[in-house]
Image (tube, rainbow, N blue to C red):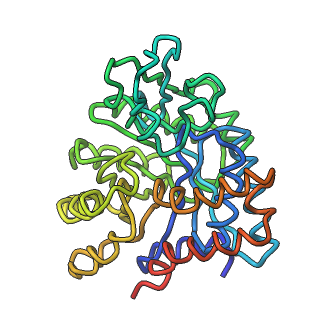
Amino acid sequence: MTDLARGEAALAVGRWVKWIAGASNQDLAAIEDLAGIYALAGVHCLDVAADRAVVSAARRGMAWALARGAAAPWLMVSLSDGQDPHFRKAWFDPRRCPAQCPRPCERVCPAQAIGEQATGQAGVLEERCYGCGRCLPACPLGLIEEHAQVLAPQAVPPLLGELSPDAVELHTQPGRQQDFEERLAQLAASAAPLRRVAVSAGAEVAPVELWQRYAALRRCGFRPLWQLDGRPMSGDVGDGTARAAVALLVARRREMPPGPLQLAGGTNRRSLPLLAARPLDGRFCAGVAFGGVARRQLQPLLQLAQARGQSLLQAGDLWPQALDLARQLVGPWLERI
């Protein structure tokens, strides 16, 4: 079995695991480190921003893992069919912050993208921000804005042709069928050898719209993968987010178009036990994607390596610890019965 065929085999038996870097994440050092660790841990796909520098960082991490015996995961890049919270950055003017502010925004930021340590001026470090939005309601004065990032239509075909990803993820929202079809035309024009086009949709996108997306995908000759985004951008908050992802699968599995169904949005260590408790529903689940939890559990080691002036992959005493933590997260899915 080739490395690329390994991903399809995992989807067929419900053991697919994807690592999500974040569609707006441009923290190149962390992306390289995390891509390397999770590739070596055995994930089947690395999902990153459709950005040249980001893809290069992910491929450097993959090369590190391949040199240590890993199977090559798919490289997936994320796009949207319009405005989407996954494609945004937080921004505020730190000069407007009162000196006595307790800075709740800084405390709630999982990417540690806010604060003097991150920026030197107590603002948002754009490269680290991946758009989770937790800081927006945290600001007591409402000073934080969100700046959307949408790739121009004319830029998509040449960019994908250059990046040559194995798969693309399209984030979709209600009422965007025409925009979705225009994105598909851009994917086709790129001639990128896509094994799958993943469609990321939350509960707000009705099944009838997903069937419309499916018809468009098939007209273009693309094979779908449905990412059920239970609670988007929530990270490893706890049982509630894990339950939301499983609940969306349970609610939707009979109504979905053909194609593998994958959990996302708030997934964490509780996701698989919750799914195992519903075996009739669980057999429809092709796999899982881990985003916030995947980064958070390795964050202390990333910081320790950074304090030494090293990357995590260069730190011979740290990366084995990171690999052990990564395997604890993804291993149960890779061995799922």
Answer left or right for 310 relative to 97. Answer: right
Answer left or right for 76 relative to 12. Answer: right
Picture coordinates of residue 2, whole percent (x, y): 68, 77
Q: Residue at x 48, y 30 (%)?
A: 88
Picture coordinates of residue 92, whole percent (x, y): 48, 19
Q: Residue at x 66, y 56 (%)?
A: 302
Q: Is residue 312 above or below residue 140?
A: below
The one nearer the camera, 121 or 83, is 121
Q: Residue at x 52, y 54 (%)?
A: 20
Picture coordinates of residue 31, whole percent (x, y): 66, 51
Image quarter in which the N terminus is found? bottom right
Q: Residue 100: which quarter of the image?
A: top left
The one nearer the camera, 130 or 12, is 130
Image quarter in which the C terminus is found? bottom left
Q: Is residue 256 above or below residue 337?
A: above
Q: Residue at x 43, y 47 (%)?
A: 219
Determine the residue located farthest toward the front in the rendered image: 100
Answer left or right for 22 relative to 285. Answer: right
Q: Is residue 146 above or below residue 270?
A: above
Report the number of discs.
Answer: 0
The one nearer the camera, 37 or 59, is 37
Q: Residue 36: which quarter of the image?
A: bottom right
Determine the residue located farthest toward the bottom in the rendered image: 337
